[in-house]
Amino acid sequence: MSQNVVSLSLSTEQIDQVHSALAVLEKNLSGLVSLSADQRRELNKMGPKSEMFARKAYDVVAQSPDIMPGSFELDEFAADIAALDQLRPIITRLVALAQRGEDTEMALGSDIYSAALEGYRFAKLAGKGTALDELRNQAAVRFAGQGRRRAAAAGEST
């Protein structure tokens, strides 16, 4: 194999431990919500500037709770800020791990696909056979239309 971006081998024990750890995460983070696309669109978004405003607003309201109507839930406001502060570092780590997982998945896929192309080239040079005929049929499906695209691109660049 001429390309080998990543080599990864996970034991059954490691896979079992990862699944156990994920189960623990899912159990302990069961309060996380899933929003629909419509809900995401409709919610007010809090960026860095909005967060500074919101935290200052909390400070003001917490110092003078009597200015708020009785229906205002100051304790829930405080709990939401505390939960956000607890959750952020966890999410940062999870996102970083997920990104590494996606990058590794992409690298493995690229290694596999490069090896398949290399194997196909060598198989074509070696001759004919039933297995090669099957591989050719798969390649024909995979690369259908690329000759037309290349010809069109060559025509545009001249």
Image (tube, rainbow, N blue to C red):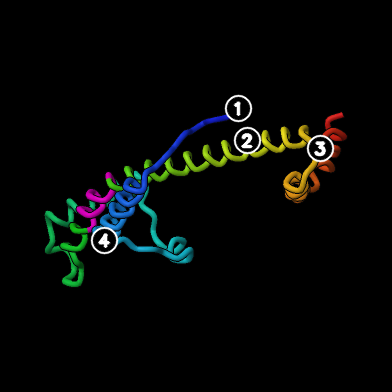
Q: How far across and down, in percent of the image, does residue 93 sit?
A: 32, 43
Q: Which mark is residue 150?
A: 3
Which residue is tagged 1?
2
Among the 4 quarters of the image, the one containing residue 8: top left
Q: What type is the residue that disc 2 sits on?
A: Ser
Closest to the camera, between mark 1 and mark 4, is 1
What separation in Å lies between label 1 and label 4 (alpha carbons)? 43 Å
**In this image, 96 relative to 80: left or right?**
right
**In this image, 63 relative to 2: left or right?**
left
Q: What type is the residue that disc 1 sits on?
A: Ser
In the rendered image, residue 77 lying in the magenta stretch gets the answer no
Which stretch did the figure color magenta? 80-89
Q: Is residue 20 above or below residue 7?
A: below
Return the residue found at the far bottom. 71
Callout 3 touching callout 4 (CB < 8 Å):
no
Q: What type is the residue that disc 4 sits on?
A: Lys
Callout 2 touching callout 1 (CB < 8 Å):
yes
Which residue is tagged 2?
114
Among the 4 quarters of the image, the one containing residue 143: top right
- Going 34% across and 44% down the picture, which residue do you hit? 48
- First along the sequence among labels 1 and 4: 1
What separation in Å lies between label 2 and label 1 (alpha carbons)? 8 Å
Disc 3 crowd, CA 10 A, few/some/many (<14, 14-19, 20+): few
Disc 1 crowd, CA 10 A, few/some/many (<14, 14-19, 20+): few
- Going 32% across and 49% down the picture, which residue do you hit? 18
- First along the sequence among labels 3 and 4: 4
Q: Which mark is residue 85?
A: none
**In this image, 60 relative to 122: left or right?**
left
Callout 3 touching callout 1 (CB < 8 Å):
no
